[in-house]
């Protein structure tokens, strides 16, 4: 079997021969009057279409090619007694992957296949490398993600998943626009990171000779816009977190955050239910989603339970009765570490996160978290030591996190002080004090509710895809050696 290098040299020689005979294989534009899907409906009429060759059969005086564009595939029938003589000679130089522009009449073959009976052919791009599956296939899964452009050509399911991703993002926008929200932008380069507990990427601004950070979340800047007078805003934001990579995490990922003045966490949960249902309907045409081999209907009212209730129901842990000794024993047995300053609340949250969340299969809001793990969430109006925070789960996966927001600069400063204690105690994910943000709140901020939704995880949920790399066009990969 020839090597890729040898095949490439053969194709280059074909290209050189074509050029000697006057062909111009890389034109700036071509005549294309119909897409392939349009051409398929035009029996008995002449069409001018273009696309990539994905199938090539025949010899001698007749060839059959499969031509692909962004709308579909159609068969080309190229006969020596029907096609322009000079153009027919071109056929022997065509390879899989080449782009052609063709003109001809649409009809059916004896086998009933809708086809274009070609009169004229123009080679508009010569593919110098063969498609992998024809010769050697992808050697491993990593190759698929490194050469996503080829993966898209060979695997229709990959294209279908990404198409659904774009539909989901569009659906989010149309839903929020319909609710009176404005789409905004906030900085990616920030002098101080914040908005969640995560480690940042650091960069250097040469013009200022100072270090900046790639944002880990847009939250604090979005809240500044609320202080500035906006009342309903959202951003679909690229975020960057210098942390681990696994089936649900990538260092570069997409989040959508929205904030609404005069709203609390109950209003935000209600709105988010509608948004997710709308996104699922847009992508799948249904509010029923598949989770592996299970079908889950997200159209109804989502269950709501406190974190205390979740621990009791799924792990038989009573929040108020379990002793510190029992907690430490459970943590040790499961090899769970508590970052920063140890507390009963943080330890129980770690147990909940490890044991309970994978069991939350049906659509569920878990609410009323301990203050110690929620530095930006507002104190609960009736439960001391708790905050008005929620997380949304479907299929055992967290898909969103939100809360009634802190609107007091004084309270926010106290929360940041606790974060500094955690940082000194070894919690690398603790948030630094953002004095500028505190000062912004001190100008006055209305009651506020907000949420962050991981777009990648939402797409995974709606498409029943349980690797984040499958739903990102170009996931981060270790460079090839």
Image (tube, rainbow, N blue to C red):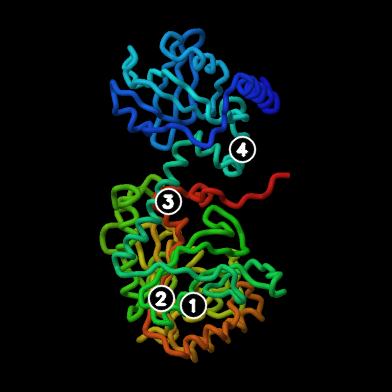
At 49% from the left and 16% from the top, the residue drawn is 57
- Give whichever of discs 4 and 2 has the lower sequence position: 4
- Give whichever of discs 4 and 1 has the lower sequence position: 4
- Between the C-alphas of marks 3 and 2, the distance is 26 Å
* Residue topped by disc 1: 374
Q: Residue furthest left?
A: 300
The mark found on residue 403 in the picture is 2
Q: Are marks 2 and 1 in contact (CB under 8 Å)?
A: yes
Instruction: List x then y, in percent, for residue 68.
Output: 44, 30
Q: Are marks 4 and 1 in contact (CB under 8 Å)?
A: no
At 62% from the left and 28% from the top, the residue drawn is 136
Residue 250: name its quadrant.
Answer: bottom right
Question: Which quarter shows the N terminus?
Answer: top right
Residue in the foreground of this view, choosing between 223 and 119: 119
- Give whichever of discs 1 and 3 has the lower sequence position: 3
Up the image or down, 298 lies above or below 121; here it is below
């Amino acid at each position: 079997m020839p090597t890729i290098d040898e095949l490439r040299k053969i194709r280059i020689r074909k290209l050189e021969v074509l050029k000697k005979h006057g062909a111009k294989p890389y034109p700036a534009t071509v005549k294309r009057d119909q897409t392939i899907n349009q051409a398929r409906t035009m029996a008995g009429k002449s069409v001018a279409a273009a696309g990539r060759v994905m199938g090539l059969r025949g010899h001698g005086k007749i060839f059959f090619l499969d031509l692909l564009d962004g709308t579909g595939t159609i068969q080309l029938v190229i006969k020596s007694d029907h096609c322009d003589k000079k153009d027919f000679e071109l056929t022997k130089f065509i390879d899989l992957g080449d782009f052609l522009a063709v003109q001809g009449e649409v009809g059916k073959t004896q086998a009933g296949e809708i086809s274009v009976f070609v009169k004229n052919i123009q080679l508009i791009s010569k593919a110098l490398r063969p498609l992998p599956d024809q010769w050697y296939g992808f050697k491993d899964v990593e190759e698929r993600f490194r050469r996503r452009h080829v993966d898209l050509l060979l695997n229709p399911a990959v294209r279908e998943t990404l198409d659904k991703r774009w539909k989901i993002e569009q659906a989010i926008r149309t839903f929020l626009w319909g609710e009176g929200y404005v789409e905004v932008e906030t900085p990616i380069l920030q002098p101080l990171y914040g908005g969640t507990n995560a480690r940042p990427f650091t960069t250097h601004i040469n013009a200022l000779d100072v270090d900046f950070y790639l944002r880990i979340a847009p939250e604090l800047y979005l809240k500044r816009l609320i202080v500035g007078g906006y009342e309903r805003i959202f951003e679909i934001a690229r975020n960057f977190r210098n942390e681990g990579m696994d089936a649900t995490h990538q260092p570069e990922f997409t989040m959508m955050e929205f904030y609404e003045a005069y709203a609390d966490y109950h209003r935000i949960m209600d709105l988010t239910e509608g948004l997710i249902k709308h996104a699922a309907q847009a992508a799948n045409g249904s509010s029923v989603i598949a989770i592996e081999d299970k079908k889950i209907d997200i159209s109804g009212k989502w269950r709501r339970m406190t974190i205390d209730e979740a621990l009791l129901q799924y792990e038989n842990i009573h929040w108020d009765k379990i002793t510190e000794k029992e907690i430490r024993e459970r943590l040790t047995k499961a090899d769970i570490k508590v970052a920063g300053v140890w507390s009963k609340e943080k330890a129980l949250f770690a147990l909940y996160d490890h044991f309970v969340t994978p069991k939350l299969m049906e659509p569920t809001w878990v609410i009323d978290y301990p203050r110690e793990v929620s530095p930006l969430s507002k104190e609960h109006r009736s439960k001391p030591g708790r905050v008005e925070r929620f997380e949304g789960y479907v299929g055992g996966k967290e898909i969103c996190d939100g809360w009634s927001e802190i609107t007091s600069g004084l309270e926010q400063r106290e929360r940041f002080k606790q974060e500094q204690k955690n940082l000194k105690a070894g919690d690398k994910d603790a948030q630094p004090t953002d004095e500028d943000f505190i000062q912004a709140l001190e100008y006055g901020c209305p009651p506020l509710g907000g949420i962050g939704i991981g777009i990648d995880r939402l797409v995974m949920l709606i498409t029943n895809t349980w690797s984040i790399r499958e739903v990102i066009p170009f996931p981060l990969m270790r460079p090839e050696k």
